Amino acid sequence: MRALAAGMLAASLLTACASMEPAAPQTEIALPRLARSSADEIVAYMARLRTLGAAAITGEVSRQRQAAARKPTDMARVKAAIALLVAHNGDEAEILALVEPVSRTGPGDVDLRAMASFLHVLASDRRRLRESAAARVRDERRAQEQLRSRADSAQERAEQLQQKLDALTALEKSLSDRQPASR
């Protein structure tokens, strides 16, 4: 009896499993790929620049200049400005000329405009620092020249005084070498 009950239980379970519909295979839902934002592109570009050596950065500067000249999009201008800024020998006037139109454009990519404004401020500050450093160097050279001139004048004065002292010493010696006149 027990065997019969176990068999019936197994048969009913198999029947129940057979009556169930097979589950549909799971398919992955394709999410639309989000386009890379300009901020993502700028960050990726800066990360790539960071890995480059000095010679490679110089090559990148010329490549970005050419790209901005061929197709002067806002992104090309910003990338060229970033490359010039990273190169440390980039001309601030050129950087400002590249980013000024981007930072002034009205509607458009906010991230790109913000980066252009940031680069504009950096280039302006760098220009101001270079100009103030150049002014300090000029002032220091002028001060050194004045000190050198004063030192030369003091040296000439010392030589003149030494000549006078030598003349007075010679005069005193010639007077002491004379025999005192007897009275």
Image (tube, rainbow, N blue to C red):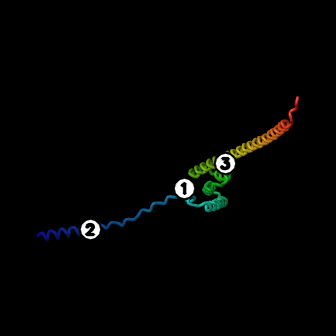
* Position of residue 173 measured from the top left corner of the image (x, y, whole percent): 83, 38
* Position of residue 170 measured from the top left corner of the image (x, y, whole percent): 83, 39
- Depth check: 72 or 149 in front? 149
Query: What type is the residue that disc 1 sits on?
Result: Val
The reply to whether the C-beta atoms of the residues labelled 3 and 1 are less than 8 Å apart is no
In this rendering, the label closer to the viewer, 3 or 1: 3
**Residue 174, placed above or below residue 109:** above
Looking at marks 3 and 2 on the same chain, the residue that comes earlier in the sequence is marked by 2
Query: What type is the residue that disc 2 sits on?
Result: Ser
Looking at marks 1 and 2 on the same chain, the residue that comes earlier in the sequence is marked by 2
Rate crowding at label 1 as few (under 14), some (14 to 19) or many (20 or more) other CA atoms within 10 Å. few
The reply to whether the C-beta atoms of the residues labelled 1 and 2 are less than 8 Å apart is no
Residue bearing the label numbered 3: 130
User: For residue 19, which numbered disc appears in the image?
Assistant: 2
User: For residue 59, which numbered disc appears in the image?
Assistant: none
Report the quarter where the N terminus lies: bottom left
Tell me the residue at 14%/71% (across/down): 4
Q: What number of labels is visible?
A: 3
* Position of residue 150 measured from the top left corner of the image (x, y, whole percent): 76, 41
Query: What type is the residue that disc 3 sits on?
Result: Arg
